[in-house]
Image: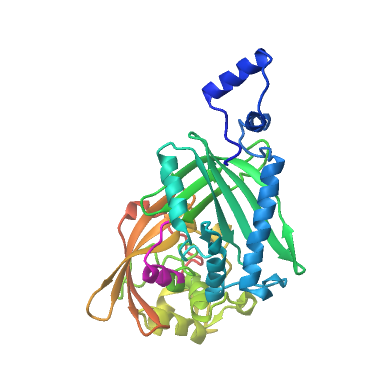
């Protein structure tokens, strides 16, 4: 049964009549009334009754057992999941029949049909609830119970994780969802009610997104493997027009750390580059992934010829592009084989902060060279009017 259903107008009137007439109120009606004792107007820190709390604790415990049975080593502190191991754990969790999402948004949700049906019903104004679980990178889990009363949606969230080889239950919260959207592509965006000024001096980010409908596995794997680490923040590879004949406007100095992660699977040790990036290392990375020669890189990037080093500084407030695009996620929605060894990817920039699954659309042409090599050849943005003025990491000399 979905608890914490808000009283509708007529139910509230009937309850008021019962109270005025001295009629008894049922236990279920008392539970419904408990919600109005919280700060319903603000919508956060709403009360959680004992039954819901006990149910959440029990469910989290059962789901952690499924995680542990899939990977007995998961309880060790410091464990970080990745790849096939995480997929195997979500498959084991999915035996519960509940919708299961991983920490990598490019992996398809298990038992997605139930989540899709619930959200479709909500769109039609039908009351209901569903419990969805998300696996964390450290092997912990988040239990999310979404409740829709026909008008408003609420989230009862609980978490459980590992600490010193023991399962620890986190805080349980109950919050009204301020607004939500479920797109045709299957993206569920929502924003929770949260404290605002003057209660807090800085705004609290309370938006989230979840991919419900499965996407093409080849498309998802392409985005996860080659584009996720680059994204739209700190470089302009995916958010500017360029090709082999027009390479001068790329932010090479900003792009270095993202191509480094793509090449080595980890972020660079920035302390190594306090005095600049060695020329050979920088040029090798750029020419490997881009249709550019070393001489061009020296001309277009911020380069110190005397020391043969490329300038580098951390991404910060004063040297980054502002706007919602920087928080977007690249999603491949089409792949076109051009018949000449190249492939053109159509990408949508999925924006959590605006609840838009195609904030920006662009076409990226690449050449795949085996399973472990790629070369980026060109990029064309369709909605150029949406592009903010790009701020280069380092102003070119």
Q: Give the colouring mode of the picture.
A: rainbow
In the displayed structure, would residue 253 be above or below residue 295? above
Image location of residue 58, percent across then percent down: 68, 54
Q: Residue at x 31, y 76 (%)?
A: 244
Residue 215: say if magenta.
yes
Residue, x 57% and y 19% (percent of image)?
14
**Left or right of 322 in this view: 158:** right
Identify which residue is drawn at 72% across, 56% down: 169
x and y percent of residue 97 in the render? Answer: 52, 58
Task: Indicate the quadrant where residue 289 lies.
Answer: bottom left
Most extreme residue toward the left, as rendered? 339
Could you tell me residue 56's position as x and y percent?
66, 50
Span highlighted in magenta in the image: 213-224
Q: Quadrant of the N terminus?
A: top right
Whether residue 107 sits left or right of residue 154 in the image: it is: left
Q: Quadrant of residue 25?
A: top right
- Seen in the picture, residue 324 relative to 344 is either above or below; the reply is above
Can residue 28 be found in the magenta stretch?
Answer: no
Q: Residue at x 57, y 64 (%)?
A: 93
Can residue 30 be seen in the rendering of this structure?
Answer: yes
| Camera-side residue of 31 and 108 | 31
């Amino acid at each position: 049964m979905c608890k914490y259903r808000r009283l509708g107008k007529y139910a509230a009137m009937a309850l008021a009549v019962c109270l005025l007439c001295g009629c008894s109120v049922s236990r279920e009606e008392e539970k419904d009334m408990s919600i109005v004792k919280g700060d319903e107007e603000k919508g956060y820190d709403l009360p959680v009754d004992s039954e819901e709390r006990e149910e959440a604790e029990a469910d989290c415990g059962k789901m952690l057992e499924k995680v542990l049975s899939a990977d007995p080593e998961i309880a060790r502190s410091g464990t970080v999941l990745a790849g096939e191991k995480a997929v195997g754990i979500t498959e084991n969790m999915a035996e519960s029949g509940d919708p299961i999402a991983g920490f990598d948004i490019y992996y398809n949700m298990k038992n997605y049909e139930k989540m899709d049906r619930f959200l479709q019903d909500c769109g039609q104004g039908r009351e209901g609830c569903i419990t969805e679980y998300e696996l964390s990178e450290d092997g912990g889990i988040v239990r999310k119970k979404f409740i829709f009363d026909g008008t408003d949606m609420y989230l009862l969230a609980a978490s459980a994780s590992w600490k010193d080889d023991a399962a620890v239950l986190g805080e349980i919260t109950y919050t009204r969802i301020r607004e939500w959207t479920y797109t045709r592509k299957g993206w569920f965006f929502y924003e929770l009610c949260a404290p605002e000024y003057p209660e807090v001096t800085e705004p609290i980010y309370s938006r989230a997104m979840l991919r419900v409908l499965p996407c093409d596995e080849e498309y998802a794997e392409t985005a996860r493997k080659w584009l996720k680490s680059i994204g739209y923040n700190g470089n302009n590879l995916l958010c500017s027009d360029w090709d082999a004949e027009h390479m001068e406007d790329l932010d090479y100095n900003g792009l270095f750390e993202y191509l480094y992660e793509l090449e080595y699977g980890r972020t660079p040790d920035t302390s190594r580059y306090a005095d600049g990036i060695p020329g050979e290392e920088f040029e090798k990375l750029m020419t490997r992934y881009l249709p550019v020669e070393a001489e061009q890189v020296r001309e277009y990037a911020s380069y110190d010829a005397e020391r043969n080093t490329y300038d580098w500084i951390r991404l910060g407030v004063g040297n980054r592009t502002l706007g919602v695009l920087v928080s977007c996620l690249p999603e491949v929605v089409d792949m076109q084989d051009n018949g000449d060894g190249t492939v053109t990817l159509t990408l949508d920039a999925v924006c959590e902060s605006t609840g838009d699954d195609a904030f920006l659309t662009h076409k990226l042409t690449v050449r795949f060279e085996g399973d472990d090599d790629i070369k980026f050849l060109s990029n064309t943005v369709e909605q150029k009017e949406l592009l903010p003025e790009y701020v280069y990491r380092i102003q070119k000399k």
